[in-house]
Amino acid sequence: MKNIIIKVILSAMTALLLTGGILTVHAAQHTILGVERVAEYDGLLQGKRVGLLTNQTGVDSNLRSTVEILRTRYNLAALFVPEHGFYGAIKAGEEFSNDSFDGLKVFSLYGDSKRPSAEMLQEIDVLCVDLQDVGVRHYTYVSSMAYVMEACATEGKPVIVFDRPNPLGGKVEGPVLKTGYESFIGLYHIPLRHGLTIGEYAAYINDKYKIGCQLTVIPMKNWRRSMRWHDTNLLWVGTSPLIPSADTAFLYAVTGVIGDTSLSVGVGTAKPFYYVGAPFADEREVYAALSKLRLPYVRFRATAFIPRYGKYEGKLVKGVEIYLTEPDKVNTAELGYLIVYTLRQLYPEQVQFPERGYVDGYKADIALGEASLRLNEAPEKAFTRWRQETEAFEREVSPYLLYK
């Protein structure tokens, strides 16, 4: 009996070594992306000149490019590219011109015009969208999709969205964007953390804002709103130069707005959005003040860093690094607000709110969708209002949810 047990153990160990993984009885089920179901919707694309709004994030679960998938099966005629370019290598806010890729025309939607022109759309009969969003309102991919939907509605071109997970899951947090704060980083009156997949987002705005395009969303399989990215068993492709991992998306939800103040959030370091600090701050003082908040599932570490580019390039910046021990349990919007509110108490003269260049208004106001942070509204008052707004939004958006 002892020899038999030893043989079983050795066989199991051999299997483990050969597979290079963890010994399991059943292979983990991965989320099936919208693009992986395209054959089920063949009739929408066969015989058509197909356009595709995409970038480096447009891949299936085996990292095969959506460009290759569509080109193999259909007549892929043109590519449309959002901010950061086709490879996701161009820094935020930097424009780029039209180009080509492997014989395909590539139209920039972040150059002189952020909308596809009628001339661009003459190249196609139907336009597909495959972009990985990060779940925060001020990330511009959903705005590019909205402009594409509007243009296609005008020109009578159908739109097909290949759905993808929201890496932040289905939680809704933060303020709803207020009238007068609309911009390319916030077109619609939705919460800062909207909790929608890109397909749900498209369905909601198409109806709510009367875009009226002929829209088809190809849904995923095996995705639930409670899932974090690692639960999907999908590989993450960096969505832009400063979002290299799905974990970074959670930190971006915390500090993305903070970066529009005089505080640094670590842009120019190897860990953008993980830090908050400034040359005028004292790291021990910042750490002590934030630690006193005793926030659940959040830890801080006193630190200093020197950005290689961007704000405070080459200067010693002192502050904290943020750790989310259970990211899905953290209200990221409220955490970001509390950090700025606390640092303003320490440095009331130095924490400032610069204006944005391309649109009237303060940068942080435009990103947050309201002026409460700049006006130093008490957190408990702001958060009570935010929670009422998100509850109302959740009721309104419920009919458009594909994953209950």
Image (spheres, rainbow, N blue to C red):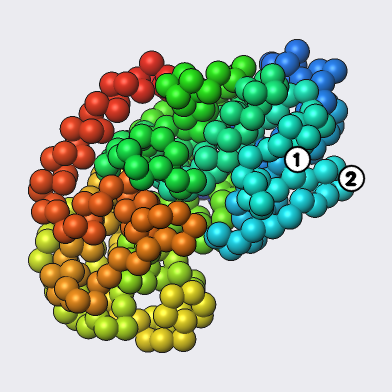
Q: Give the numbered dot on residue 103.
A: 2
Residue at x-position 43% and y-position 75%: 311
Farthest-out residue, bottom: 315
Name the image quarter holding residue 183: top left
Numbered label attached to residue 324: none
Q: Mark 2 belongs to which amino acid?
A: Gly
Give the labeled residue for mark 1: 79
What residue is at 33 percent from the left and 62 percent from the top?
Answer: 258
Say if 288 sits above or below 357 in the image.
Answer: below
* Sequence-wise first label, 1 or 2: 1
185 sits left or right of 342 in the view:
right
Q: Residue at x 23, y 56 (%)?
A: 373
**Residue 165: percent from left, percent from top:** 49, 35
Quadrant showing the C terminus? top left
Report whether residue 119 is seen.
Answer: yes
Front residue (pair 12, 142): 142
- Report the side of 186 relative to 321 (left or right): right
| Position of 91 relative to 38 (above/below) | below
Residue 44 in the image: above or below residue 2: above
Closer-to-camera residue (129/7): 129
The amino acid beneath tag 1 is Leu
- Marker count (numbered): 2
